[in-house]
Image: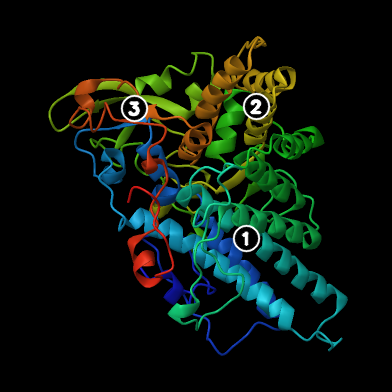
Amino acid sequence: MKKIYLMLALAAGLMSSCDMDKEPYNALPDTEGISTPTDFANARVSLYSGLRGCIGGDSFNNAMEIQTDGFNAVTGYSNTLGDMYRYTFATSSGYFSTVYSSYQGMIARANYILDGYKKVDMSNAVVYTPENIAKIKVAVGDAYFTRAYSIFGLSQYFCADYEASTASAANSGVSYRLDYAPSSSAATYPARATLEQTFKQITEDLDSAAKYITAEGEASYGYFSQDAIKALRARVALAMDDYTNAAKYATELIKDGKYTLAEDADELADLWQNDGGNETIMQFACPTKDELPNSSKIYQPYSDGSVPDYIPTQTLMDLYSAKDYRKQVWFNKMTLTTNTGATGEVYCFNKIVDHGALWTKLQGYEYARFCIEPKMFRIAEMYLIAAEAYAQAGDLTKGAKYLNDLKGKRIEGYEETSFPTKNALMTEVQNEREREMVGEATRLFDLKRWHKGFKRGVPQQLDLCLLPGATTTGFSLDANSPKLTWPIPKHEIDVNKKLVQNPGY
């Protein structure tokens, strides 16, 4: 894995994926800047090709799912994410390095465009027509959005929860540059900002993105839009405990009516198996083999007679009623036999299916198995943000409304429920968020935000599980544990002496 500040000279190239198994950083020459409309167009493409790989797969999604409470390892598993499951990971773990270096690489790509825009001379009216200038400005808007998204991503994985009382603490935030500096010496490497400074930068970048991005957005839209900006603002506001703005941005998207919830099993299957439906606010297109996203192979048997690496806990399955469409679509019952001879019929996680739309589109291409067009934002998440924000703000009526609206589309015959206290409403919001967002890289962040520890759920069948015991099936973590925040990767600490490691590592 490349050291990130040495990598800044390379990161603005056309990196095809953020997955740790696909690490080709194609260098842009240090001596060449970005100036022509074609340069900006090509650089804009690199933003999408890079971010496509920063959603899904083992590093960005599954590592935190397996780290928390919803899944058990199966005897005979491949040991993928085994260190995350058993909490034997070290600061040198490749998963940490992949996420950290990928987001830093995306920041460098964005800075490459923004620096070029500041320097470009557009006085030649033949080359810089109004149409070409408009296209360049779209690339600039996308760069601001990408930088905001990437800095926020780093803050979620590698920083503690945002609290206003501690946000100004030294070294609590993200280390990032706001310029493209491929030839920087070690003396210029940035230290960590405070969380307050970090979130101020995210907000400012989103404000700038909103000035340049003019597309409003539509269901399954493949580019950044005003709606994507609102969705990210809602996430950021919730992370900051800014409940007023979290509810504002989330409900604006809901009330707009462009994005509608799947309301039966067929529509839910269409969303996840066919990349269809009207729920997705931002979804990356993957039209060719070279543009495939990261796959998710750990939850289903990969070949006949094999076992999945991980199966849901009984505790997770018990969150769903028999009439919940998500239980019907996202989980399938299978008979598993481990290498010890233990056999049992259990639920397996099947949100991203083996042979989905991408596999069909690419005519059975092997590496399209367990692949889906990456969904950056869904309207279901906005219902959950609105419900949580109103609940935390003490508006139980509005909080219950958005929670009931979501559950009413997910559960056959659902009857609206009232919640007499904030605690009752928040408990159900937390349960519903676990039901809805399972497998989508939110669980660790949610636990941090709620200041909740966890105990790994009760297994569906103990003898199918790998080495049952206190470090596996019975693992628990206190709410104050530093392990809920990932460490800054060791090689980053080694190369940038200004970085301060997170507590507990």
Height in image: 461 above or below 68? above
Quadrant where the N terminus lies? bottom left
| Image location of residue 215, percent across then percent down | 79, 55
Nearer the observer: mark 2 or 1; the answer is 2
Tell me if residue 504 can be seen: yes
List the residue tagged with mark 2: 392
Circle 3 sits in a helix, a strand or a loop, which is it? Answer: loop
- 375 vs 327, left or right, is right
What's the distance in space between the residues labelled 3 and 1, CA to CA? 34 Å
Residue 395's mark? none
Tell me if residue 17 can be seen: no
| Mark closer to the chain start, 3 or 1 | 1
- 223 vs 316, left or right, is right
Mark 1 neighbour density, 10 Å: few (under 14) some (14–19) many (20 or more): many
Circle 2 sits in a helix, a strand or a loop, which is it? Answer: helix
| Image location of residue 22, percent across then percent down | 40, 63
| Image location of residue 485, percent across then percent down | 42, 45
List the residue tagged with mark 3: 456
| Mark closer to the chain start, 3 or 2 | 2
Q: Amino acid at mark 2?
A: Gln
List the residue tagged with mark 1: 146
Mark 2 neighbour density, 10 Å: few (under 14) some (14–19) many (20 or more): some
Nearer the observer: mark 3 or 2; the answer is 2
Height in image: 420 above or below 133? above
Residue at (75% x, 57% y) in the render = 207
